Amino acid sequence: MQTTPSDSNALDRKARMKIAFEDLPVREVSDRIRDFDETFLPIDAERAKREAMRCIQCPAPAACVEACPAHNNIPAALALIEQGDFLGAAAIYRATSSLPEICGRVCPHEQLCQGACVRNKKGEPGQTGALEAFVADYARAMGTVEIPRGAPTGKKVAIVGSGPAGLSCAEQLVQRGHAVTVFEAFPAPGGLLVYGIPNFKLSKRVVQARLDDLRRAGVEFVSNARIGKAHTIDQLFAEGFSAVFVGVGSLIPATMKAPGEDLPGVYQSTDFLIRTNVPEEFLPPDMHEKPRIGRRVAVVGGGDTASDCLRTALRLGAEEVTCVYRRTEAEMPGGKKDRALAREEGARYRFLTQPVRFLAGPDGWVNGVECLQCELGEPDAKGRRKPVPIEGSNFVVEADTVVLALGYWPDPEIGESTPDLKTHDWGLIEIDRASGATSRPGVYAGGDDVTGPDLVVTAMVAGRRAAASIHEYITGKN
Ligand SMILES: Cc1cc2nc3c(=O)[nH]c(=O)nc-3n(C[C@H](O)[C@H](O)[C@H](O)COP(=O)(O)OP(=O)(O)OC[C@H]3O[C@@H](n4cnc5c(N)ncnc54)[C@H](O)[C@@H]3O)c2cc1C
């Protein structure tokens, strides 16, 4: 329920509306493309109070709360920030979110809370994401972030996958007194928070601090532990776990099946981002080698991953970095904010361009992408107009490094190795949306392995929802 402290309307709406919109502090392009540090600078207490005062305290249900998948009580938190009660505001976020320091940084706020803010009608929304990150960081700096452990129930729960879904499920279950073990295939926990989202959007330091909170609360992490064919979910039950949560994401890269896709110098986006953004001690042994970055880099795709690859290539010193996308900018799935940052940093865009073949130079290394010009045709099932290649319009985009950011598929392994676990569409796990329960009693699922590639916040909400159902299941309430 949305509540508001009584004196938060001390300033009337008109006075609030008059407080000018200020852009968030961001590092200069020339400075930020030299390293992988976060792009946005932290705001200070005075700036946070000023920003919070711009909230006109809409009556419940406020549009920002409705648009937030976690339904964070944003107006109440902002009312406390305005009064300088940053710890109180942080507690409001923590009540509905397991990862506020992360969501405050990486949520596409312009499509969620900020997009819904009534002040967005003039393009000047409340900058709620920055305020969420500010109070979460403040509470951490004050040493007040602690996950309270519930009285032990004697029950054990296994979590498979340590992305935002698995971590949030773990956070909720330890608070209810259950012993939680997280099994993770990679050498370190974090999922795409570590092995995907680049540092310039989300510092690994922020993720590690949250992982340390979970460790302190008693969550056990088992790394390099792939659950599936060799170590099955059935075995986990035999080992004494009362329930299993599956949050394995959707991590199989989509391919084009175009000639030359396997040439040296053509990288899959996740492989490229992991090799360039992840500290060596977290890398699997076969991923230590850095990608060879040429002078000209082409990134194929139009989502957020493509923006991340463009911005990574620029930071690695490439001179010409071009995004190749087969529709127009209007159909691009990636967020506008990331695209604007990429453009500012020097990325170029070639729209209505369909790669058909990757070309090799005399040394066998990729040296170009043969493309066809496209025009827009009829809308597809989702209403997006289809690209229609124009016959004979072939041309070459020169590139000595190519990154394919074409999207992701679910991994069918868990479905194939778990009897009675229903999946659909190449391996997405079927669940009851209200509880997260799968077709297999005691097995719950949530995040990208249920929805397909989505967002940190939606995975986080799914993990929390499943934790509530798991608690009811293992304590016999359901
Ligand atoms: C490059 C990139 C940038 C992104 N940027 C943003 C962004 O800015 N904002 C945003 O909101 N979202 C972003 N996303 C999307 C977001 O990261 C995902 O939606 C979210 O991480 C999904 O969470 P999850 O817990 O379902 O899965 P994941 O984060 O994918 O975690 C799944 C984990 O399960 C592990 N695993 C897989 N199979 C097994 C197995 N069999 N046994 C054990 N472990 C296993 C994997 O190794 C992985 O660690 C981005 C995604 C990518 C790829």
Image (tube, grey):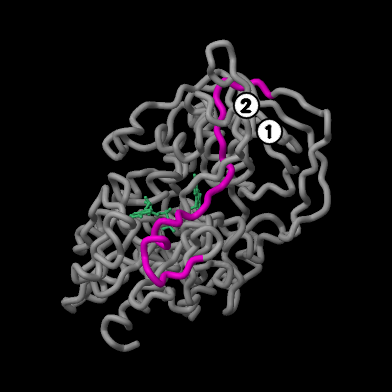
- Crowd tier of the residue under label 1, counting other residues whose Cα lies within 10 Å: few below 14, some 14–19, many 20 or above: many
One can see residue 185 in this view? yes
Give percent across and percent down for residue 411: 45, 54
Which quarter shows the C terminus?
Answer: bottom left
Query: Relative to 195, does residue 349 appear above or below in the rendering?
Result: above
Q: Can residue 48 be seen in this view?
A: no
Local secondary structure at mark 2: strand
* Res. 177 image quadrant: bottom left
Q: Does the residue tagged 1 have its C-beta within 8 Å of any atom of ligand 1?
A: no
Residue 24 falls within the magenta-colored stretch: no
Q: Please rate how many residues cluster around mark 2, counting C-alpha atoms within 10 Å: few if below 14, some from 14 to 19, many from 20.
A: many
Q: Mark 2 points at which residue?
A: 358
Q: Does the magenta stretch include residue 399?
A: yes
Question: Which residue is under mark 1?
Answer: 355
Give yes or no for contact between labels 2 and 1 (Cβ–Cβ under 8 Å). yes
- What is the x, y in percent for residue 474? 27, 81
Q: What residue lies at 58% left-to-right and 78% top-to-bottom? A: 61
Seen in the picture, residue 355 relative to 118 is either above or below; the reply is above
- Which residue is found at the position 29% from the left and 34% from the top? 285
Q: Which residue lies furthest to the top in this view?
A: 362
Label 2 is placed on what type of residue? Phe
Q: Is residue 48 left or right of residue 167?
A: right
Secondary-structure class at tag 1: strand
Q: What stretch is highlighted in magenta?
A: 397-423
Residue at the image position 65 percent from the left and 60 percent from the top? 18
Q: Residue 151 carries which label?
A: none
Q: What residue type is labelled 1?
A: Pro
Q: Outermost residue, bottom direction?
A: 477
Give the image quarter of residue 200: top left
